[in-house]
Image (tube, coloured by chain):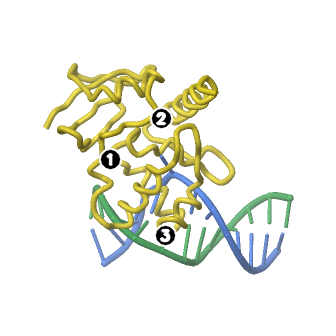
Chain colours: A yellow, B blue, C green
Amino acid sequence: MLSGSCSFNLWKVVVDWDEATVHRVRFLKTADAGSVPVQFTKFLAGKGTDFYPLTSSALLGDSVYARIYREVSKIPYGKTKTYAEIAEAAGTHARVVGNAMSRNPTPLIIPCHRVVGTDGLGGFSPDIEIKKALLAMEKKIVKLQK
DNA sequence: GACACATTTTGGA
DNA sequence: TCCAAAATGTGTC
């Protein structure tokens, strides 16, 4: 398995991946050098809006989690959905969706930052600032593309 | 096997 | 209108 990192604001984005499958993505303050798929560097620079043809190993399988992750990955660039909407689509409950996002093995690929609370931003790990920055960037890019 | 969770919704005061 | 508690599935201890 390959491993590498790139930067987003003050954070390092560490990616563990194979050819076209991403196994794990983490946000760390420091990271070792290494290469990441070009989709990551483009996306984080605001020059790409998806990770095609990359997929996440979290999307595989038929557990409730996998269904939730598939629903989340359908959210279009620059849009958001609520925990309740995801829960309904996946046939489960909002609490479970929150748990799934919290344990999301591959942020960015599964755009957990696009999942918000009914009446607020929701949460994000390890830092809500990352979620806010990603959403702000996506909104900006969408606006520029118009 | 119990408990913790990035929530939401509903019922009672 | 606001507060409190239940619902619910998975991973970790």
Which residue is identified by label 1? A105
Which residue is depicted at the point 32% across and 47% down?
A: A105
Q: Quadrant of residue A61?
A: bottom left
**Which is more toward the observer, A4 or A21?**
A21
Which residue is identified by label 2? A127
Q: Kindly identify which numbered label has been placed on residue A23.
A: none
Q: Are marks 2 and 3 on the same chain?
A: yes
Which amino acid type corresponds to the residue marked 2 in the rendered image? Asp
Which amino acid type corresponds to the residue marked 3 in the rendered image? Thr
Determine contact: label 2, label 3, CB under 8 Å. Answer: no
Q: Position of residue A24 (x, y in %)?
A: 27, 42
- Label 3 crowd (10 A; few <14 / some 14-19 / many >=20): some
Q: Is residue B7 left or right of residue A3?
A: right
Comes first in the chain, label 2 or label 3: 3
- In the image, residue A91 sits, relative to residue A79, either above or below, namely below
Q: Position of residue A38 (x, y in %)?
A: 30, 26
Q: Quadrant of residue C9?
A: bottom left
Regarding mark 3 in the picture, which secondary structure is present there? Answer: loop
Which residue is identified by label 3? A92
Regarding mark 2 in the picture, which secondary structure is present there? Answer: loop
Which chain contains the residue that carries disc 2?
A: A
Which chain contains the residue that carries disc 3?
A: A
- Label 1 crowd (10 A; few <14 / some 14-19 / many >=20): some
Which amino acid type corresponds to the residue marked 1 in the rendered image? Pro
Which residue is depicted at the point 52% across and 68% down?
A: A93
Q: CA distance from mark 1 to mark 3?
A: 20 Å
Q: Is residue A36 left or right of residue A70?
A: left
Comes first in the chain, label 1 or label 3: 3
The mark tally for this picture is 3
